[in-house]
Amino acid sequence: MFIRVLRDYSLCTSCGFCNTISRCLNDECVGCLSCYFACPYEARRITVDESDRKMISITVDGIQHSVPERITIKEAMKLCGYEVGIYPNEGKVAAPCSTGGCWACMVIADGEAVRACVTGVRDNMDIITDVSQKTPLRIIHGPEPHSVGGKATPWFEGRGVKYIEVAIWAAGCNLKCGSCQNYSVTYDNSSQAMSPIEAARNVTYYRRIYGVNGMAISGGEPTINKRWLIEYFRELKRLNPDKNARLHLDSNGTLLTPSYIDDLVDAGVNNIGVEPKGIRLETFMNITGINDKSLAERYLKTSWEAAKYLIDNYRDVVYIGIGIPYNPAFMSFEELAEIGDRIVSMDSEIQVCVLDYFPTFRRREIKRPSYKEMLKVKEILNGLGLKYVIVQTVYGHIGP
Ligand code: FES
């Protein structure tokens, strides 16, 4: 069964997102679903395409295959028997975002580096999957200075300084949160991609301009292109060898397996924030838009285990923060308390930052939690024994 995506003009607001940020890269629909996931007003419909399709010839790693026209390289590879994964080193190609931002799915097509998830196949296309000799790429926004920092920015560094760190944001995410707090970065497939070396140089330059020690990367989800991220941190460490340099990763933790964490620390990362999106599976699925139950279970488990692994193994060398997304539309105080209990069981002195998820993207109907509500959140978590709780509020960060 083939699909194509159509615009639903009854929902389209002509916001322009699909012409500027998340653009179609093909002459006709190849069913990549990039626009379907990115449209803030859900004005795209998946339909079954019953029109005739020719079979075309492609070559993958020197082997010739026959595949239908008007499909992505990713789909063609699946039809040719290649496994396409999400976690690093699972599958011949990893396609964790499938919306064109992360470049983890890079292959060489007719001599050119392209993204397999959003690029359509052409007749006689020659595809090479080994990109180990090519520079990894990623769409990056920033750097920009931050005056308050993220969930793992050490709370005590923020006192009396104008800027606390310089941050960049990586496009592409493996989650599809309806309340994505940074969707114009997450779904950007149209900006020029950058090498890890270029990004590290930019960040280092702006570190000096703003006189900060913290250099953060957030997203989107930074971890979904592992090769890019490890090379970025290695270069950043080389350019910033001083002991004050804080190499900060903010992640949803869903891909942070123990070996990934070991590789990050080895590359110089000394500040990691992990934000499990809830503790109950149904909440996680509701927040993240991941409808595949077994994948959602794996993501949720991996993110909590990442927090524990970091605490058990790297407490002395990595400043760790745990983020909690809060909004009463998707989380009760009861579940918040369950999360608090779980963190206390790992380490009651770990920094916890609760983010007051505001209405945006596809969840514009929710209300931003009030200042009073966020103080209540803080009271609940402190009451469970957590010592360093920060809550994000309309008036800025409160705590510890
Ligand atoms: S999976 Fe293709 S760009 Fe992210």
Image: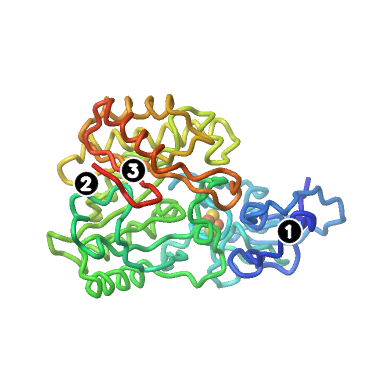
What's the CA distance linking mark 2 and mark 1? Answer: 44 Å
- SS for dot 2: strand
Q: Which residue is mark 2?
A: 319
Q: Nearer the viewer, residue 127 or 62?
A: 127
Residues at discs 3 and 1 in contact (Cβ within 8 Å): no
- Of marks 2 and 3, which one's residue comes earlier in the chain? 2
Q: Which residue is mark 1?
A: 12
Q: Amino acid at mark 3?
A: Val
* Left or right relative to 104: residue 318: left
State whether label 3 is within 8 Å of ligand 1: no
Q: Position of residue 104 (x, y in %)?
A: 48, 57
Q: Amino acid at mark 2?
A: Tyr
Q: Residue at x 62, y 66 (%)?
A: 126
Q: Which residue is mark 3?
A: 391
Q: Quadrant of the C terminus?
A: top left
Q: Residue at x 69, y 56 (%)?
A: 65
Residues at discs 2 and 1 in contact (Cβ within 8 Å): no
